[in-house]
Image (tube, rainbow, N blue to C red):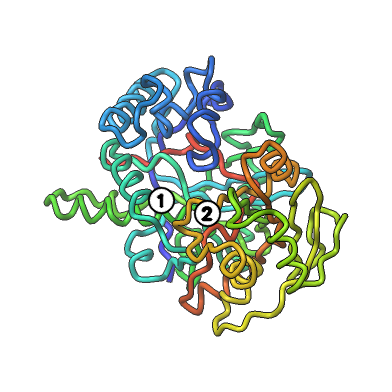
Amino acid sequence: MAHLHPFRALRPAPAVVQEVACVPYDVIDVEEAHALAKGKPLSFLHVIRPEIDLPDGTDEHDDAVYDMGAENLRKFAESSHALKEAEPAVYVYRLVMDGRAQTGIYGCVSVEDYDNNVILKHEKTRPVKEDDRTRHILTQRAHAEPVMLTFRSNDDIQSITDAAAEEEPIYDFTAGDGVRHTIWKVAGAEQLVDAFRLVEKLYVADGHHRCKAASRAAEDVRNRGENIPEANYFPAVLFPMDEMNILAYNRVVYQLRGDTTDFMEELRKQFDVESGADPIPEEKGEVCIYFSGEWHRLTLPPTRRESLADALDVARLNEYILEPLLGITDPRRDENIGFVGGIRGTEELENLVDSGRAALAFSVYPTSIEELVAISDAGLLMPPKSTWFEPKLRSGLLVHQFD
């Protein structure tokens, strides 16, 4: 049974919502955050990427970064640009990208559900990223960004969602990337709360580190003896599985162990390599490789290993090429591998290789939502960076404060 929790959102005034809303913290680096926030004092990047307001070169884990994030959130909350809901509520959030709509429920979910595997994970988290997000939550006394979850929908949830989306929205704007964002406040949140009690499992789509950080922050609050029930919940947008859109999560390798001739010769010994190929795999099992200015295509053999997770294309790439030919045995920690979200296109892979910043690139076939759910249900974990969900949620729209 899943717990959906209405909350009193801190949110932008409608007149400035487009100035405030920004991309999530983890899809851009510091330089990109600087560029996106330039000349935009209301951008929520000042809260979720507060290092942009500190001297260049400031370490992102410096105490000053966390303090700046909390101060920027406080200033926003106290400004005329922000509203605080009088009563707890849940919302419907629709994103439209390239004519395709994806509609979910925006509310809070329970740390207890996360700890007890009602909310299922499919990736390991890294302690350094957990520490970072936990400190931001505790310093700001807020969850500034939602996570993305998915679930098996039912008719009751669908009918409530449809009815809410017929009303006047509180926000409706198109972001700079062309994605339209529309949010409605749901009348009668208790109906949705009751409907989600019939949902057996929720699945993390995007935001594993934010989920874990919420759990750790709640534990920290309890350990300090603070009685703050609201700290036991964190914001999420919950989408039906059949509306989820997963793109490829591609890979680049920065350096080869031998020379370029050795790699290609070994590749051709083991695989039937088609050169001059298109850069995007056409079906599961295919991988495309950009190397020395040309795209190559091959089909990966079935896994020789045991689990469902080993059958993923990204896992088979590890098994047959990254480990034996390139010496990358732990993609989670090896600094010789990088990951490029599919939204950036294969042109980004070509740019990285052609510029000399990478030695080669892999364009992979996307993981399916069915694979994600099956692996999560089995209690297994995927290789790192197995899924890239689009469109991304915007941050700064509905903030969950717990102080």
Observer-nearest residue: 95 or 295? 295
Residue 254 appears at what percent x and percent y? 59, 48
Q: Nearer the viewer, residue 28 or 353?
A: 353
Residue drawn at x 40%, y 21% is 56
Toward the top, the furthest residue is 39
Q: Which residue is mark 2?
A: 206
Q: Quadrant of residue 3?
A: bottom left
At which x and y percent is residue 380?
48, 75
Look at the picture and state if 311 lies above or below 21.
below
Q: Amino acid at mark 2?
A: Asp
72 to 171, vertically: above or below: above
Q: Is residue 285 left or right of residue 7?
A: right
- The quarter of the rendered structure image containing the C terminus is top left
In the rendered structure, which amino acid carries the disc numbered 1?
Answer: Arg
137 or 232, nearer to the observer: 137
Please identify the quarter of the rendering in which residue 171 is found.
top right
- Image marks 2 and 1: residues in contact by CB distance under 8 Å: no
Query: Which residue is rendered at x = 80% and y = 58% of the image?
Result: 296
- Side (left or right) of 244 relative to 55: right
Above or below, 3 relative to 142: below
Percent coordinates x, y for residue 143 in the rendering: 37, 43
Which disc number belongs to residue 210? 1
Secondary element at image label 1:
helix
Where, quadrant-wise, is the N terminus in this rendering?
bottom left
Q: Residue furthest right?
A: 276
Q: Residue at x 28, y 39 (%)?
A: 141
Q: CA distance from mark 2 to mark 1?
A: 9 Å
